[in-house]
Each structure stands twice: as structure tokens, then as C-alpha cells.
Image (cartoon, rainbow, N blue to C red):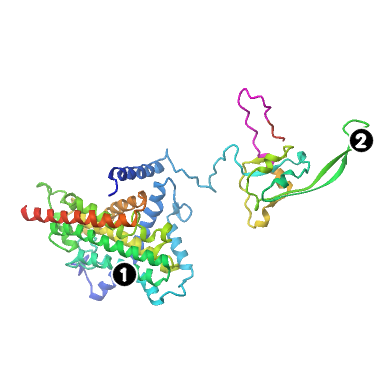
Amino acid sequence: MSELIFAIELAYWQQTLIKVLVAAVLIPTTALILGIVFLFKMMSWMQSRMGPQEAGPRGLLQLAADGLKFLQKEDIIPDRADRFVFKAAPVVVLASTFLTYVILPAGPDLIIENLPTGIFFAMAVSSLSVVGVLMAGWSSSNKYALMGGLRAGGQLIAYELPLILAVMGVVIQAGSLSMQDIVWAQADGSMFGFGGLGLPFVITQIVAFFIFMVAIQAELTQPPFDMPVAESEVVGGFHVEYTGFRFLFFFLGEFATAFAFAAIAATLFLGGWWVPGIDPNSALANIVGPIALFVKIMVVAFLIFWFRFTYPRFREDQLQRFAWKYLIPLALANITITGILVVVL
Amino acid sequence: MPKVPGMVKGLGVTFRTMVETLKPSGGPATVQYPHEKEEPSPRARGVIALHEENCTACMLCSRECPDWCIYIEAHKTLAPPRRAGGKPRQVNQLDRFAIDYSLCMYCGICVEVCPFEALFWSPEYEFSEVSIADLLHEKERLGEWMETVPDFEPYEAGSEAKGKKVPR
């Protein structure tokens, strides 16, 4: 499929180069978009403020200015830090984000690599960030960083499980692990015999969607699950010792991951790049697809950040209890019922 | 398990606030300060102004100041007698009256304690300086602020006390 992008035959190395360049430009851009639209603007509006106004038209370049500021800052490594691990940790976190983008489909042909085990791959590489976070917390030789890192470790592992179990419901219904096949399953589906709108899995898998949204909130260490980076408790958690561009890496990783998770949620539950009324086999779908996906991502991201700006922080034990005692049994029940219904119907 | 109805209500509050902020009739609760200014409340404690003619250099304000930020220098001089043929009066001539606003904590004790109504609160608040030493303001600058002092509000109806007036 991806050998033919707009009917131009490309050699393997040319394809790879294009894909790498697209991803390298795309990922910081997505982080910037989410940061400005939601973190700066929507958060301000929800707090009855206007947000940044001075940098660029209506303050839209504020985050770019902040990024440049981070690049100018001194790169400080604590004296007692484990220098190699300290330097490697942000790269590991960012690498897990970059790898997640590999399987995001933006159109019938617009996908970096259509892996047959796409969603499994995404879940696997996104849990890599735990390693980076633990590395950062451990190597900083700072008690707050260590506490934050361990909290993050416990939290990310606890919420990885409901995340994957929620995805399982969709996978059972679609009958495939591939992201493209999941989109096709939704495009080909029908609601009570009416196929015009397809079947976005958010309708049949509403419980899984709820669990997924809660779990990615915790995976992104955002409020109300932001104990690992709680500035009032552990002054920034695992990235307390990071300055300059290494901190920028963490920041970029956080928001690019938010975008990636929003894209996964949009693909699994809202039909991804598919729009009702446009033939998924036509070339038009390759042009409309990215726009449709972007709109759906923004809707999901709005939900994510809406929760973020509304709720206060949970306590550490409440967080663990919520994951293990409520979300995981709920997700297991959802899988069981989905499995039975798929077999019966 | 968190209480679900309350959590939904919370989402409603943030969403309503967002809509309210974006509506042309609503707007944010904040003010874009350097571009637009907020009217300070009528008796805001912005800066302390000095009406020089009323000052007798009695030093009460200087002595009561918890931060010791008021500097007063004066000398004795003879003023013409009030009535013809009387003795010339001995008065204090104010040489220097300065308030160091880098020390002042805006408690207003000097304004309260002044027996001759020489010190007043002004709502003026834009007097920041680049250097901290420049915040020591002499009596000329303190006198300029007298123009910004608002009139006292009239007392309640039926009050027996005579309303105070700001000397102009």
C-alpha cells in the first residue's frame, strides 16, 4: 500500500527518508499545537483569563518563544548524577513517543508503517517511557526526582493494564490488531442495518472508551493523575534536575505523546481518517483523511485537557485503588461481554 | 471511588467559564494591564502624598513608622506675628521630607498619626523604578501626588462629625 503514494514509485531509501523527515517535522509541530491550543489558550479561558497575548498574533508564538528560551539555557548536570543515564533518559522518553507515531494512519496510504500488530506495537513502545522516567528519577541523585520517578513507575504500570484491556475490546470487535484494519472495520460496519455512518466503535465500546480516556490521562501524568510531577509535593518529580533542551525533550515528549494517544483514541473509537460519505478507496480519502483525523484528534484532545484543567489531584493510594479495584475489573468485564457478543451475533 | 455527579458538575463549571470568557458580552476576569488599566477602588492605598504647607516637622510620622522609612530635616525660623505689634512666631521650616518606598510597607500609620493633615493616601500606583535607590522620593515628588488624592467620602447621614476636606 504505502509503496504507492500518489502514484509515484519511490525507492525504499527515498521512502524511508521522506517518512523520517515527515515524522521529525510532524512530532514537534503536534506538541506545539496541543501546547498552544489547549495548555495556553483553553486553560486560560477555563480560568477566565486570556492567555498569552504578546508573542506573535494573539500570542500564538508564545510556545515557540518558550522553546527558544529553553535552548538558550545552561545545560546543568548535577555533580552526583549518573551522567550517562541522566543524559540518556530524555532521549528514551522521546524515542518512545517517536515510535508511537509509526503506526498512526492518516489515510488509506498515509501511514509510516502498516504493521499487522499495530496497536500492540503502540502499547508496547508507549510503555517504554516508564524506563526513561525511572532512569531520569534514579540518575538525578535527588530525593524528589527519585520519589517522582518511582511514583511515575507505579502509576504508569498500574494504568498500562486498563489501557491495554480497553484496547482489547476494540481489537476483539474489529478482529485485527492492525490500525488500518480497525479503521476499515469501522468504515464497513453498520448500525442496525444502516451503513451510511459506518460503526464508530465509541458506540459499541463506550465502556472501553471511558477506560481508555481515564488510563491515558494517567499515562500522560496529567491532572488529576499528576502525582509523579506534582510541583507542590515533589517539585516537578523526575524532571526536577533537568534544564534547557533536556527539559524541552520531556515537555515535547509529554505533549507529542498526548497527541499520539489522542490519535490512537480517535482511530480506535472514532473511525480515524475515515469520513462518512467519502469512498475510502478513492484518492480523495488520502487528502481528506489527515484533516478528518486531525479534527477527531482535537476533539479527543479537548476531552483530555478538559479533564486536566477541571480536576484536582488524586492521592497516591486513591490512584492505585482506582486502577486495580475499579478500572481493571471493568475492563475485564467489557472484554468478556464483547467476546460473548462477537461470538453470539 | 470518586463521586460521579460532582465530577460532571465540575466539568460543567469549567466549560461554562470558557464559553463565558469567549463571549463578546462576557470576557475574562483579568485586565490586559499595560494596554488597559483597572480603575483602583476609591480609597486604594497606592502611594503616600504630602501636603507640604501643613507639615510642622513634628516628627510623629517618622517616629511611628515601623520601617523607619521617613526622613525629615527642618530648622527653626521666625515667622511674622499674627497680629500687628505681636511677637514674631517661632516655626519649623521643613527642609527635607522623603519617603523611601523601597522600605515602606504601606501600613498607613504615618497617615493616621499625622495631627496636621499633611499626609494622604493617593490611589496612584505606577511609580516603579529601575534602580531600588530611585525609590527614595523627596517632598517635591510627594507633593505632586497630592493632585491625585481623591476627596473624602461624605459621612453617613445624621453623623455629627464634620466631614474632612483634602487641602488643595
On the same chain, marks 2 and 1? The answer is no
Q: Within the magenta stretch, is there residue A129?
A: no
The quarter of the image holding the C terminus of chain B is top right
**Pointer 2 residue:** B87
**In the displayed image of the protein, which residue is found farthest to the left?**
A344
Predominant secondary structure, magenta span: loop
Q: In which quarter of the image is residue B6?
A: top left
**Where on the picture, by quarter, is residue B123?**
top right
Q: Can residue B119 be seen in this view?
A: no
What amino acid is labelled 2 in the image?
Answer: Lys
Per the model, the C-alpha gap separating discs 2 and 1 is 94 Å
Along the line of sight, the residue nearer the viewer: A278 or A264: A264
Q: Position of residue A78 (x, y in %)?
A: 46, 72
Span highlighted in magenta in the image? B145-163
Q: How many marks?
A: 2
* Cβ atoms at labels 2 and 1 below 8 Å apart: no
Tell me the residue that label 1 is attached to. Answer: A131
- A10 relative to B151 in the view: left or right: left
